[in-house]
């Protein structure tokens, strides 16, 4: 149809402004959907990280802090739990399993976690998945280490490779436990959780590499070799936290109260699920603000489109008078301008989706690495399509404004061509 | 004072193709401008030149004639149909069907090709489409008209904006004539051309209008063109124009 082709050519002739308008819409749509993706992705990622653990116990601190450092490797413990207390808690009759963890060292920016082989047995993620070994096995020897998938992939380790643990959490440790190197005994399959970025060693090994250390530095003149340390008593003196699974969910609150009231040492026991809810409550306001801002950006882009069409309207009065003269109805002119707005908005939205997924594919590994958030790349969900539909509808309604103006002009201009 | 004598009466007794009676019109929203036509007729096959200075209301008269503007009172009967009584869509269809219109300048959609511009009216009128296709296809008919108006077929695929002003006016004439509408309206079609080209353009326009057996209504401020037309009349002899305050 010639009319549509001419309308298309008219738009193509203004391709630069049309492109920029479309790009503005695309970026705003990308932002709108992206905020939602990151939001749900972050929630899902957090919620998926810890499953099947009923309580987490650590030194007295905020519930969030405990959850973040014990499970997500974000932040640091304020204090430790003594081994004695740990053993006391472990005796509670309701406990099905308890796994101690000890944090504080690192390897090339990845955190080193001391634990027991039970960790591999009881830790659950994404509701029911348990940890699996891609190759190798749990630690048998004192200086065995089990690597998360990302650690092995990024540092190129294989079974049998030696690794040296650094004291502290810097990406480049100045102080290294280089006198007691570890050997890679196993590599875990990828989980999409912080486990992938963790180096697991035994609790005894953590104790062993710190035997000749005090207050974060080597004790001068004292050096215990790796061979000597094997003959020493390596029972840990303290741990950072413990994950607990209970025989019955009914016992959760009773045990939590008992631990929080523990006399000998100030402790905190938290429920991972409800603490996560607390976290969402905390960031909810920020999420709402982000969503509001991205909605504003969409509105701005639509305003830009209306402005763009309105400014071209005057020079196109000629076009409209010509169309009217050959028999086009004012409704046809209204339709053409609406179609132009609709085309811009639909193409803009489509481009926005493309940009969104390109961005997700491009940034996912970085976000994963830098923030420990695994944002799943999934097709758009119903709610997101609904948002998108809302944007398109709003755009078409906005397009009505210049279209109605053109309609009025074409009625008023009559035969006169105004340029 | 007119340089050429004004031929105010209809010279030949042809059947009426247009009749306007008791027409009263004011532009909506534009204060004070009112146009009244008590009685006006146009005979089939006439070549009618309407004279008047710019801004005198000629374009309004043409708008009423072509059904782009609708009078508040009175009848505009074209080919037996009172277009003032038609609904908006029907009137637009009627115009597309029976009128070919040439503007003063900027006649073409600049982004479209020459062929697109010529074929444009066929999108709005089934009958003109059929008539244009009768002689072996609309493209062929467009090429024939363009060739008759001195536009080479090689130019058909070119963007309209790349043509000279004179060429553009000839393309506009081809667009007005394609599918053989009965009435050709030309609103100062030569005012953007120099004198030599004006005459050449009118020669061609007259020739193609005569080929098609159409009626021509042309508007100009230039009375010196009058000798080429079958009837010449100043606007004020046909229509009463009033300006100023609207009566209560």
Image (cartoon, helix red, strand yellow):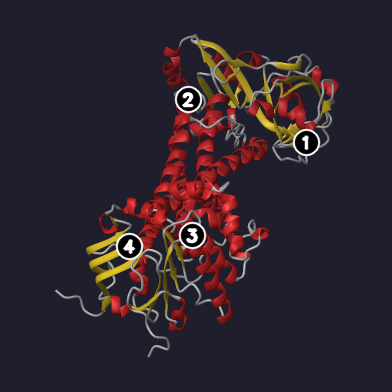
Residue B37 picture quarter: bottom left
Q: Tell me if residue A89 comes above or below residue A380 in the rendering.
A: above
Can you tell which mark lies on residue B225?
Answer: none
C-alpha separation, residue under disc 1 versus residue under disc 4: 118 Å
| Image coordinates for residue A98, horizontal then vertical, percent | 58, 15
| Quadrant the C terminus of chain B occupies | bottom left
Crowd tier of the residue under label 4, counting other residues whose Cα lies within 10 Å: few below 14, some 14–19, many 20 or above: few
Can you tell which mark lies on residue B212?
Answer: 3
Q: Is residue A301 left or right of residue A164?
A: left
| Viewer can see residue A163 | yes
Can you tell which mark lies on residue A273?
Answer: 2
Classify mark 1: helix, strand or loop. Answer: strand
Foreground: disc 2 or disc 4: 4
Q: Earlier in the sequence, mark 2 or mark 1?
A: 1
| Viewer can see residue A28 | no
Q: Is residue A335 left or right of residue A10?
A: left
């Amino acid at each position: 149809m010639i009319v549509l082709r001419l309308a298309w050519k008219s738009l193509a002739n203004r391709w630069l402004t049309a492109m920029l308008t479309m790009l503005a819409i695309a970026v705003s749509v990308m932002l709108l959907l992206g905020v939602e993706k990151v939001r749900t992705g972050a929630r899902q990622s957090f919620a998926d990280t810890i499953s099947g653990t009923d309580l987490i116990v650590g030194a007295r601190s905020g519930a969030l802090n405990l959850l973040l450092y014990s499970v997500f490797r974000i932040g640091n413990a304020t204090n430790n739990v003594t081994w004695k207390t740990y053993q006391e808690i472990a005796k509670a009759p309701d406990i099905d399993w308890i796994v101690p963890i000890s944090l504080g060292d690192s390897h090339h920016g990845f955190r080193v976690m001391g634990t027991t082989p039970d960790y591999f047995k009881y830790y659950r993620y994404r509701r029911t998945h348990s940890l699996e070994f891609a190759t190798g096995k749990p630690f048998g020897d004192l200086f065995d280490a089990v690597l998360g998938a990302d650690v092995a992939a990024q540092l190129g380790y294989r079974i049998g490779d030696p690794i040296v643990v650094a004291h502290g959490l810097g990406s480049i440790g100045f102080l290294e436990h280089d006198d007691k190197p570890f050997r890679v005994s196993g590599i875990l399959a990828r989980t999409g959780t912080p486990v992938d970025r963790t180096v697991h060693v035994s609790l005894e090994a953590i104790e062993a590499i710190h035997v000749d250390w005090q207050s974060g530095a080597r004790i001068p003149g004292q050096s215990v070799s790796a061979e000597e340390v094997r003959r020493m008593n390596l029972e840990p003196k303290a741990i950072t936290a413990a994950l607990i699974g209970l025989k019955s969910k009914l016992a959760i609150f009773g045990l939590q109260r008992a631990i929080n009231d523990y006399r000998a040492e100030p402790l905190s026991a938290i429920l991972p699920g409800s603490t996560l809810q607390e976290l969402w409550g905390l960031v909810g306001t920020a999420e709402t603000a982000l969503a509001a801002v991205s909605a504003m950006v969409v509105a701005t882009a639509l305003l830009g489109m209306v402005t763009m069409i309105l400014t071209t309207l005057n020079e196109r009065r000629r076009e409209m008078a010509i169309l009217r003269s050959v028999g086009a109805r004012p409704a046809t002119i209204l339709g053409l301008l609406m179609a132009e707005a609709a085309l811009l908005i639909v193409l803009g939205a489509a481009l926005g989706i493309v940009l969104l997924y390109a961005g997700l594919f491009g940034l996912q590994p970085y976000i994963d690495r830098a923030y420990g958030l695994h944002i799943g790349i999934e097709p758009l969900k119903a709610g997101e399509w609904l948002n998108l539909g809302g944007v398109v509808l709003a755009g078409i309604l906005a397009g009505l404004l210049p279209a109605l103006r053109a309609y009025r002009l074409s009625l008023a201009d009559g035969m006169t061509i105004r340029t | 004072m007119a340089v050429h004598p004004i031929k105010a009466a209809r010279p030949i007794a042809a059947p009426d193709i247009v009749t306007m009676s008791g027409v009263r019109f004011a532009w909506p929203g534009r204060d004070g401008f009112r146009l009244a036509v008590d009685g006006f007729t146009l005979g089939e096959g006439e070549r009618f030149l309407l004279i008047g200075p710019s801004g005198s209301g000629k374009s309004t008269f043409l708008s009423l004639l072509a059904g782009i503007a609708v009078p508040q009172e009175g009848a505009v009967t074209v080919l037996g149909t009172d277009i003032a009584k038609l609904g908006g869509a029907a009137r637009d269809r009627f115009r597309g069907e029976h009128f070919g219109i040439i503007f003063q300048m900027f006649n073409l959609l600049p982004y479209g090709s020459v062929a697109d511009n010529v074929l444009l009216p066929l999108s709005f009128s089934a009958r003109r489409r059929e008539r244009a296709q009768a002689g072996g296809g609309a493209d062929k008919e467009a090429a024939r008209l363009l060739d008759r108006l001195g536009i080479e077929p090689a130019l058909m695929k070119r963007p309209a904006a790349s043509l000279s002003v004179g060429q553009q006016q000839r393309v506009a004439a081809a667009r007005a004539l394609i599918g053989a509408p009965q009435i050709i309206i030309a609103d100062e079609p030569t005012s953007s051309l120099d004198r030599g080209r004006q005459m050449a353009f009118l020669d061609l326009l007259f020739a193609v209008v005569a080929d098609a057996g159409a009626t021509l209504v042309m508007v100009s401020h230039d009375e010196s063109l009058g000798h080429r037309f079958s009837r010449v009349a100043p606007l004020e002899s046909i229509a009463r124009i009033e300006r100023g305050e609207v009566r209560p």
